[in-house]
Amino acid sequence: MDATTAPHRIPPEMPQYGEANHIFELMQAMWLGKHLNSNLLSVESLIAKEYSSLAADARTHYQKFQTLPDVLLVRLLQERLREEDCIRRGWILDGIPETREQALLIQTLGVSPRHVIVLSAPDTVLIERNLGKRIDPQTGEIYHTTFDWPPESEIQDRLIAPAGISEGETARRLLEYHRNMVRILPSYPKIVKVITADQPCVDVFYQALTYVQTVHRSNAPFTPRVLLCGPVGSGKSLQAALLAQKYGLVNVISRPGLYSAETLPTVFNKSCEGCIMKNKVCCGQLLKEAVADKSKYGEMIRPFFEKETAVPSYIIMKVLGQRLDQQDCVERGWVLHGFPRDRDQACLMDSMGYKPNRVFFLNVPFDSIIERLTLRRTDPVTGERSHLMYKPPPTMEIQARLLQSPKDSEEQIRLRMELFYRNSAELQEFYRQAITLNGDQDPYTVFEYIESGVINPLPKKVPGLRAKEYPPGEQS
């Protein structure tokens, strides 16, 4: 497989001199973007976007204050990453994020890079490079007194030193950079590569290129086949996305019982938004494709669509099984959530040979799930999703027009939770080696527990304990 064809997502956390004058940093990012055919995204490119009211507002603010509020910057980034070219070709972030707050805001949107590159050099070298910067006021070309001096005397005579590159100003910016960097890097554990920038640019480029073409794999001595179980709102989708993103697992989303002729387009377009992205498979889309292709299973599914009734589990499992048998699932592994929902479906899945080697149950109190789901809203004009507590709309005008999905009503959530817990005891009994986690905590803390459960041997159960019980200290 050619690694250069995959979507690459790399935020090069460059030194402060690069952030200030975009010489070395921009050169490396541009080379990577060109070589990988990925999209290079920076603050400048985001605010320069045409036909975007959000970008127009950002330009106005940036021209006035020379900076952007974190929330506005992240919304710009989110808007850009939803476009088809970013989904298909991947992206490289240049100088984003600049602070830990920005990094956390980006992560809450589910945006997580596969590789993080830090270019490091002594401050004395960075100051020297910055002091030598010169600009041609006529062409805007950037030169350097030591590394890139123009041979033409006419150009030499008109070069000027840009403002803000004095030794004191550069040292101040470097101090700010170092303070921010030590807080940013813990947000990207195990995917950071530090490259010494005090060497020829070509050497730096090839080290960066080699790193971004590597694929992070689990330390587990097996191909991970992970099953996530939990009530609605427990965070299964986010944890599955994080596992798929970090380890290249195929993320399989299944929502049995929703697939009818009327509901399928809604399920695919809204509930499964983003399923066209690499490593992500929606069971609803698999059923839809089977019907469109007029395959053997498609002809079996069609009557249920026409009658607007639920597709039987055994048919869903047949279609799902075809996908799990494909080469990417066999070689890289998969993470499944939403199926099975009861013991009968688990037995069916097991009898067909699809046996997860890691099973996790996410437990979240009812009050927390009510808070997570009943406060979700959708803007009918833009389609933007909000949360009245965690992600409130930016203006009162937008808040006034927000709508709540009927499925997010407290009554509907209570019914779905009761259905899950009615079957969860039997599921836990069936999957005796399942690991039960507290899902009511920071999602990245939950992910660390799941990741530990995937790469480490399963804990041994003490005889007499139920499936979901552990001796003190075993779970961590």
Image (tube, rainbow, N blue to C red):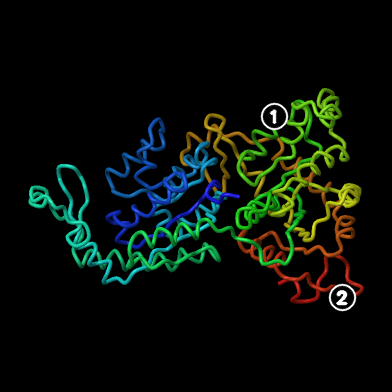
219 sits to left or right of 353? left
Q: CA distance from mark 2 to mark 1?
A: 47 Å
Q: Residue at x 59, y 36 (%)?
A: 378
User: In which image quadrant can residue 260 be found?
Assistant: top right
**Extreme residue in the top direction:** 306
The circle on residue 265 is: 1
* Front-most of residues 339 and 15: 15
User: In which image quadrant can residue 147 be found?
Assistant: bottom left
Q: Are marks 2 and 1 in contact (CB under 8 Å)?
A: no
Query: Residue 204 at what x, y percent from top left?
Result: 39, 62
Q: Which comes before the other along the chain, label 2 or label 1?
A: 1
* Front-most of residues 287 and 47: 287
Secondary-structure class at tag 1: helix
Question: Crowding near pointer 1: few (<14 within 10 Å), some, many (20+)?
Answer: some
The circle on residue 462 is: 2
Callout 1 amino acid = Pro
386 sits to left or right of 320? left
214 sits to left or right of 43? right
